[in-house]
Image (tube, helix red, strand yellow):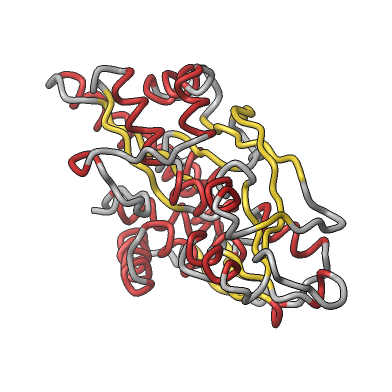
Amino acid sequence: MTLGQLSAFVLVARLGSVTDAARTLGVSEPAVSQALAALRQHHGDKLIVRTANGMTLTPGGSRLLPIASQMVALGADADAAVREANGVAERMHVVVTSTIAEFVADPLLEAFMRRTGQSVDASAGLAQVAEMPVLVTNRLADAALGPRLEGDVASEPVFRCNIVAVAAPGFRPRGGPAQWPWLVDPSGADPGSGTAQLLRRMAVPESAIRVFPNQTAAWSAAANGSGVSLAFEHLVAPQRRRHELVVLPTPVTPRTEYWHLTTLPHNRCSTAASSLRHFLGTPAAMQVMRAPGAGVPPSRFRPPVYVTIWS
């Protein structure tokens, strides 16, 4: 029985899906299924089974879940304790939404590590909104940066911004927003994201939505006249200054949104996560979140990956 197997079980139980657990761990679905099979064999119990209502815990699985969650958390504590004893920088994993990953995560964490004197080794991981509280509460991530999250977590606003609709200067939409072609980044496929919520409020059908690999690609398609995109107003400012895109009013935009930092409750969050919370209130952090375009040195660039303690 390994931490990897236990973390797979916890995520399948919390997220209700082998597919979602595999995506969160950054492994294949067969790998998650194999981990569950090993636990079932070890305990002589099916632990969690698929039913008409989704994944359902057996009585044994219900008993195992809180213990497994504690063991995964203790594994994270053990790793941190050994690193501290050896004078190694404290690890900190921050899960973020796709747009924050694309524009903000790297320069923000680079600025944070400079502020801490490299005593923290910070990295970013992509996650859907529904996965974020599960990752934080089960110590698979130290913090989340994105929408406000519910549950046994502390979710605090750290940055105020506006979401706007943008299109090419010559774009002439026909009908209402529900009839327009919408060009979005992966957040458009995340039901918990602000993008998806706005599309639902405008009653945009799935047939009118095209999802691009990243926000920049969606904006590029919009600038070419292919449709309308959604954007954080401060992040799309360079394209607006170059007159590639203009703001297109809709009944639900501009919309004010807050980025929240979510951690375990203050008395239980990691030292690094607590330091990040304080840093995000500084002018230096505000400047990076407002205008992250300066980038980071090649040696410090880290493409966001899924957070995992797989073993």
Q: Which of 164 and 119 lies nearest the eye of the viewer?
A: 164
Residue at point 54%, 19% (across, down): 281
In the depicted structure, whether residue 175 falls above or below residue 238? below
Task: Tell me: 271 left or right of 164.
Answer: left
Determine which quarter of the picture holds residue 151.
top right
In the depicted structure, whether residue 220 falls above or below residue 83? below
Residue at point 50%, 56% (across, down): 61
Residue at point 43%, 57% (across, down): 24
In the depicted structure, whether residue 294 falls above or below residue 25? above
Task: Tell me: 263 left or right of 165.
Answer: left
Determine which quarter of the picture holds residue 174.
bottom right
Callout count: 0
Residue 93 image point, x, y percent: 37, 38
Residue 118 image point, x, y percent: 23, 23
Determine which quarter of the picture holds residue 183.
bottom right
Task: Tell me: 297 left or right of 253.
Answer: left
Residue 56 image point, x, y percent: 59, 64
